[in-house]
Image (tube, rainbow, N blue to C red):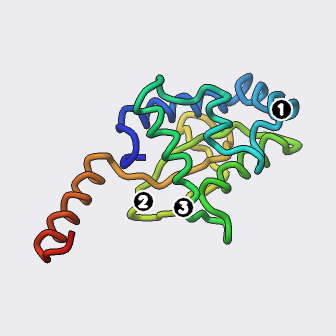
Amino acid sequence: MGGFVKDSTALSILVQINARFGAGEPIEEMVALQKEFKIFSNKHTLRSSFALLHIAPPPGKERQRWYRYLQELRKYPSDKRGVNGHDRIVQAIEGNLESAKPLPMRLIVHAAKENPAVTVSMATPIVFSKQKYVVVSVPTAAGRDVRQDIAREVRARRATGKR
């Protein structure tokens, strides 16, 4: 996310998603919405689904960057062979919401340098709770790190005379 939206925006989005898919009433509401409207399916992009749920930054540049990031997830690998990161997230949400015993869900991030793939697992991500969650982890880097990497690449190209 760091290369697309500000770090503070990324944190805000994580809070929105995790609140919407949290334990108890939030996940129950999402199950009901999925049953009635099929918000998450291969017929809808994450951009469309999250926009419908109003999971986005306020209107403006950050919102457009967020939507671009969601589209870019199609280029990310996932822990499921032959499935890109975007589709893996959609499948995980859809599968959980339509399962016999849906679990709350948690979106977390991990260092892209350590693992460039979107991963899905079951875990207890909240240390003070024994509640199991479906955990979706997306690769990311801090915005500052991404900008420094780009600057290094530009300097290296200039040094070799390539533009």
- Observer-nearest of 142 and 65: 65
Q: Position of residue 79 (x, y in %)?
A: 62, 65
Q: From the viewer's perspective, is residue 19 above or below residue 156?
A: above
Q: Residue at x 61, y 25 (%)?
A: 54
Q: Secondary structure at mark 2?
A: loop
Left of 159 or right of it: where is 104? right
- Tell me which numbered mark, 2 or 3, is placed earlier along the sequence: 3
The residue labelled by disc 2 is 112
Quadrant for the C terminus, please: bottom left
**How many numbered discs?**
3
- Tell me which numbered mark, 3 or 1, is placed earlier along the sequence: 1
Q: Residue at x 67, y 51 (%)?
A: 122
Give the label on residue 37, or none.
1
The residue labelled by disc 3 is 75
Left of 148 or right of it: where is 41? right
Of marks 2 and 1, the one in the foreground? 1
Left of 132 or right of it: where is 99? right
